[in-house]
Image: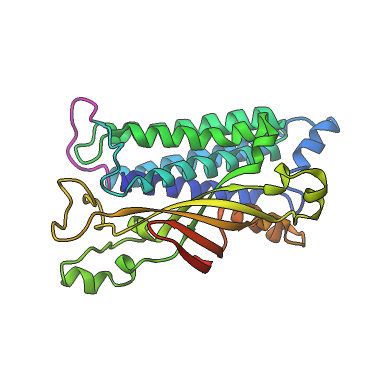
Amino acid sequence: MTYSLACRGVLVLGALWWIGCTQPASGASQEPELAFEKGEGIRYQRLALVGGSALTLRYLGFKYFEATWYDGPKTDRIRWGYDWAGETYLNLDKGGHLMGGVVMAESLKAALLWCGLRPRPAALLGSLASWAALFEIEMRDANNEHWGFSVPDFVANTIGASLPLFHTFFPRTQAIRAKFSYFPSALYRDNEERRQAYRPHVNHLIDDYEGMTFWLTLALRDFLPARQAAAWPEFLGLAVGYGATGLHGSNVKSKGPNKYYKDLPEARPEFFLSLDYDIRYLPGEGRVWSYLKETLKWIHLPAPTLRIYPGWRFYLLYM
């Protein structure tokens, strides 16, 4: 659901904000573990700061959304949604749910490491807290007449929140990561002109799924023989991307018998193969720069890309 995805976005951005404000100047991802090994243990003042910030963010966020997006009519039972076919956004919205789970779980894990927890407990608690927060949003959707409990959204949330846990308990899986890229589509750039002409358009950036691409990236060096791996740049990997073209707009069917614009063709999925750059290998340290690199690791940077479907097309720099 678009609005519940916006809730997740606000919560994730809030999590990133207090991670950035509270982490130390350098070596943020390693310092807590080293401190614990030195016997300093859990830092309860930091834990109180993290917990209090998270609870405050939750309270303020839901207070706002209850007065705006959840103010519509309620039902006396759960409205279950099973949009596996993805007739509205071709399941690109599920990519947003997955990325929301990943970013929130990793951010919470980083905060708990800073509080002195060991990596595995921090990852476990971070994933559980992320999953619980996203589940709460889904349950708030469940009795709303406009939304409902989306089972595919719930599955995407669960996968996203679980990825950092797998990365921690099974380190070799860190070679595979989820990323995201965005460039405004014509549906958003020309929305006023398109709206007046009764053509597909979106009014809000968060609805512009045609401009979004979701990626699974592979650190190729981890899978090469030793000699080839030594010659392969650490920062360079491969990525498989999924997007869509021909969407019909915000919260309307883009394919199937109930598609919104009867005179237009159905939307089609797009599949891409691209190079991928790991921004964390950029040189330099310091609090702000290290935080930016860690934050931007979820962004797939513009790179040479080959679209495989529908139809072969090469992009020198795909946004």
The answer to whether one can see residue 60 in this image is no
Quadrant of the image occupied by residue 196: bottom left
Quarter of the figure with the N terminus: top left
The answer to whether one can see residue 279 in this image is yes
In the displayed structure, 85 sits above or below 188; it is above
x, y (%) of residue 206? 36, 56
Taking the image as shown, residue 301 lies to the left or right of residue 65, namely right
Residue farthest along the right direction in this orientation: 38
Viewer-proximal residue, 27 or 2?
Answer: 2
Viewer-proximal residue, 202 or 141?
Answer: 202
Q: Does the magenta-highlighted stretch encompass residue 75?
A: yes
Residue farthest along the top direction in this orientation: 77
Viewer-proximal residue, 228 or 181?
Answer: 228
Taking the image as shown, residue 186 lies to the left or right of residue 288, namely left
x, y (%) of residue 129? 52, 32
x, y (%) of residue 16? 56, 49
Tell me, what colour scheme is on the image?
Answer: rainbow
Q: Which residues are magenta?
A: 69-79
Residue at screen point 70% across, 40% down: 114
Number of numbered discs on residues: 0
Residue farthest along the bottom direction in this orientation: 193
Viewer-proximal residue, 275 or 31?
Answer: 275
Taking the image as shown, residue 66 lies to the left or right of residue 227, namely left
x, y (%) of residue 155? 41, 32
- The kind of secondary structure the magenta stretch mainly shows is loop
Residue at screen point 77% across, 49% down: 27
Quadrant of the image occupied by residue 207: bottom left
Residue at screen point 19% across, 34% down: 74
Q: Does the magenta-highlighted stretch encompass residue 68?
A: no
